[in-house]
Image (cartoon, rainbow, N blue to C red):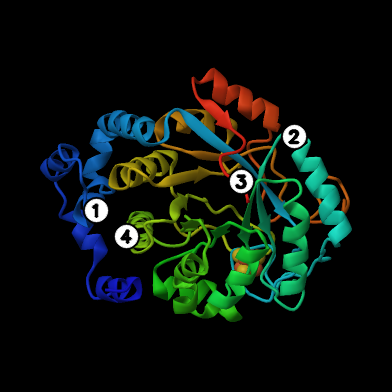
Amino acid sequence: MSFLEQIEQFEQISLEEKFQAVTADDVALTLARDRLDGRDLLHLLSEPATGFLEEMAQKARRVTHQYFGRTIGLYAPMYIADYCTNYCTYCGFSAAVDFKRTKLTLAEIEQEAQAISASGIRHILVLTGEAPARTPMSYLVGAVEILKKYFSSIALEIFPMDEDDYRVLVDAGADSLTVYQEVYDRQIYKEVHPRGKKSDYSYRLLTPERGARAGFRAINIGTLFGLGEPRSEAFLAGLHAKYLEHEFPEVEISLSLPRMTKARGGIKPRNILSDKGFVQCMLAWRLFMPRLGLTVSTRESAAFRDKLIHLGATRFSAGSKTDVGGYASQHTDATPQFEITDERSVDEVAAMISKSGYQPVFKDWEIV
Ligand code: SF4
């Protein structure tokens, strides 16, 4: 069954009622098992599971060490353009928001690359808004060609494409793709994506599969916590990751947990995910999928990220800037997409990881 068909099946039932029916005994039985299925994920994300967080954390720590060792991969985001043709009601880059937009030239991208690589970072995540006419394929390929000189891994978070277009970027040297569904609840999806290409729910849902078929070696997905009901969103995002892992066993699958913050001109979060809820999601996903990568960005505070190292996280961004040209200070009037909360430098984040008994990993992949 395709993942779209799975979503359609879940739309016929009330996930809220399913969560309400879970008992503490269900959670205990799930925790006694090693190979978990979708029902177990539902148990671990339920309210009764909040009484088992310590047990979940101990097991998640063991499983993470077993599959990843004591390592945390480091990466940095690089925003190269903030033009966007979509109208996401929660984002400051929305076409509905009036501000001075910026796009780096290829020479400026090289300056950014030099500034970031000087910090030791070797994995880069390249971001644009979604405006294909402003950031066409020729521009993206040009950017990848430059970045290859400085970074061993290039991930893209750009407008969703057809498979053949992704293949061009893979051939150019990009190896990873990040694309968030933002919200799996189709009704809310419709409300928060009223216009633009992104309003096509199915096209976006199937984007990770197109990327995997095109040859990306790693795919990172996620839901933006703050839009849909958190337990249901975490459940569907977990099933999506499991589906991708099953269909594309050669591809590294990871999940991110971005929590929405109020953006300039944007709506307020409709559903708050608490710190405790955040930890529960991470632990539940880790136990559900032992090989799953778990990425935590600098949206989260330094103190909170320090704790997450021990709870299943595998990748941290560090020293991040979320405005276009932010590292080499090329466009001092550019606007950040969201505010950074953990403002520590790459060195400081790496030192904290070492102090916690883990190894900061700058490079675990090389483009050949
Ligand atoms: S979330 Fe992405 S697609 Fe939506 S407005 Fe912001 S930059 Fe554009």
Please say if the residues under marks 2 and 4 sit with CB atoms less than 8 Å apart.
no
Residue 88 in sight in this render:
no
Residue 330: x %, y % from top left: 88, 51
Q: Earlier in the sequence, mark 2 or mark 4?
A: 2
Q: Amino acid at mark 2?
A: Ser
Q: Earlier in the sequence, mark 2 or mark 3?
A: 2
Query: Disc 2 versus disc 4: distance between alpha carbons?
Result: 36 Å
Where disc 1 sits, the SS reads helix
Query: Disc 4 versus disc 1: distance between alpha carbons?
Result: 19 Å
Where disc 4 sits, the SS reads helix
User: In the rendering, which numbered label is found on residue 119?
Assistant: 2
Residue that carries the numbered disc 4 in the rendered image: 246
Q: Residue at x 33, y 43 (%)?
A: 290
Please say if the residues under marks 4 and 1 sit with CB atoms less than 8 Å apart.
no
Of labels 4 and 3, the one closer to you: 3
Q: Amino acid at mark 1?
A: Leu
Above or below, comparing residue 292 to residue 86 in the picture: above
Residue that carries the numbered disc 1 in the rendered image: 42
Of labels 4 and 1, the one closer to you: 4
Q: Amino acid at mark 4?
A: His
Within 10 angstroms of label 2, few (less than 14), some, or many (20 or more) residues?
some
Residue that carries the numbered disc 3 in the rendered image: 366
Above or below, comparing residue 70 to residue 292 in the picture: above
Residue 267: x %, y % from top left: 58, 63
